[in-house]
Amino acid sequence: MELTGTALHPGSASGTLFVLHKPLSLWGGVDPLKGIVADPRHPQYEAPLAGRILVMERTIGSSSSSAIMLELLRNGVSPAGIVLGRPDAILMLGILVARELGYPTVPVVQVDGSGISRLAHADGCRATISDGVVEVEGRASPRQGSA
Amino acid sequence: MFYVNHGMTETSLELSPLEAELLAASGPAMQLAMGIVVRMGEILGARELVEITSSHIDGCLYHGDGGVEFGERLVELGGAVAVPTTLNVGALDLLHPTRVRSRGHKREMALRQMRAYQALGCAPTWTCAPYQAGHRPALGEHVAWGESNAVCFANSVLGARTNRYGDFMDICCALAGRAPRTGLHLDENRRATTVVDTSAIAPELKTRDVFYPVLGTWLGATVDDRVAAIIGLPGTVTEDQLKAMGAAAASSGAVGLFHVVGVTPEAPDLATALGGASPEPGADLTPHPDELRAVRDTLSTAGAGRIDAVAVGSPHFSLTEFDRLQALLPSTPFAVPFYVCTGRSEYRRLEAAGRLERFADAGVEIVVDTCVVVTPILPPKDGVLMTNSGKFAHYTPSNTGYGVVYGSLEDCVRSAARGRIVRDESLWS
């Protein structure tokens, strides 16, 4: 499967797709030192974001989430890439500041709502982001890897 | 320090010649700030920038070393704010150094972060209620404010125009003197799209302070980021009541602006608040007493029994609120710590009036520059905190590990005197 979206932040990355089942605020919802989901009320509590391609509609909650995105990049535990359903100013701000500080940044792609739904079926598959294009290996099935 | 502007000289925004120069060839700190403001404008779909007259910065609270590095980078690059700018709380009480328990690296970095923002020319107000410390933009002024309660107050009560600018964006706007012209800067997005009719609520309850954080919590959870026009509130509603309502609404939801018809400046009447348009079909909301009582109950995680501390002052306590508290103080000291969080501007006025001693005698601990839910101040234990603040009630369990009980200021005073929860339920029955 290949999806073409808009590169909100350029670059390329590969990793396993990690599709959020429920919206998340990075501030209070992600541990900036460990890069894992830290909100005990979230269904993916303690799941790692680090090194994976994070797929979500957008972040919710506190505008201090920009600071958490910055810390994830600074501490080397951020997702390898991010696919969003909507432009997300809070998350992008953390990435822009990271770039200014010379930290490694990660590519961000915005796709449309149907793109997010298609990726939701590919949770756990390997994917590559390259300047606005998301390429998922194999067919879009969560069981692809074990079949 | 070597600085690269990542080649950002072209943009889809329509910039004035001066703005284009600020972006491309003005100096490293300005170019960095303009680059971020312009790029965020593109992401948010703005067509141009708007000049701002002031800023309030929430980015001075320590969340991690990256934030300190960013503040210090701006200082190294020669950054200076272009408009009058106040600072929100930091993670330390600079007037009472032993008040906050953090030590070592965290304490040092929290201080460095506060110092960096001050070095950029921001006024060291260290308050989440800058509008009580003399920072009051006029009706229609464009500003760039951070801190959700301050944003809500500036838009709703003062009629100034700001989006909810968070960490980094607030200081970039202050350095650039500009913000993307989008969201609540635009007339069309300031019109109410929802009407909240409070006529089912008892008039007596609507005169009490304890009502407003509850209405605010309900509002945020119900409308999220939509603009509501609230009808049926008494014309006597106070600024402190509106402050408390906005803070609660911006905690349970993403409310950046509300109108109180007949009270707030953009809502002399309902038709004006709606901007001549009709509200969205089915968008009229009529909160019922049972519903608000249920919301009030969600503000507490503990129901009865002992408490370990009381905290008030989120947003920061005003002088009027200190007057009310002073009138309620018991003749014998409180049985548990009673924290009042406030800005140094109010604190200095109490000091000048010789009033600090009276509060100290009663066992009141005045916290300035910061507050009890953003930094370790409460005694380290699994206790129960009582508060009259909807915002404290919202954040206390996750940020401090304490259980929380919500009540009126009178309830808080009575409970602190006995060390046990005492609440007047008659208003809610």
Image (cartoon, helix red, strand yellow):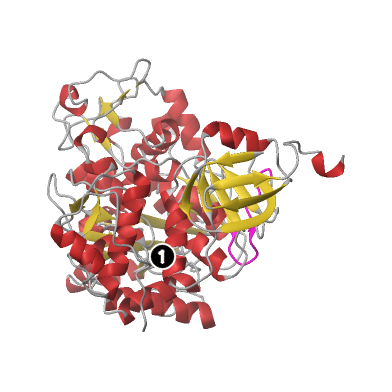
Crowding near pointer 1: few (<14 within 10 Å), some, many (20+)?
A: some
Magenta: main secondary structure equals loop
In the rendered image, residue B117, in percent from the top left (x then y), is placed at 31, 73
Residue B383 can be seen in this image: no
Q: In this view, does A28 lie to the left or right of B251?
A: right
Q: In this view, does B184 lie to the left or right of A1?
A: left
Q: Mark 1 points at which residue?
A: B333
Residue B47 can be seen in this image: yes
In the rendered image, residue A46, in percent from the top left (x then y), is placed at 70, 54
In the image, is residue A65 above or below residue B183? below
Q: In this view, does B264 lie to the left or right of B376?
A: left
In the image, is residue B75 above or below residue B407? below
Q: Residue at x 23, y 60 (%)?
A: B55
Q: Residue at x 17, y 64 (%)?
A: B83
Quarter of image, res A147: top right
Q: Which residue lies furthest to the top in this view?
A: B281
Which chain is indicated by disc 1? B
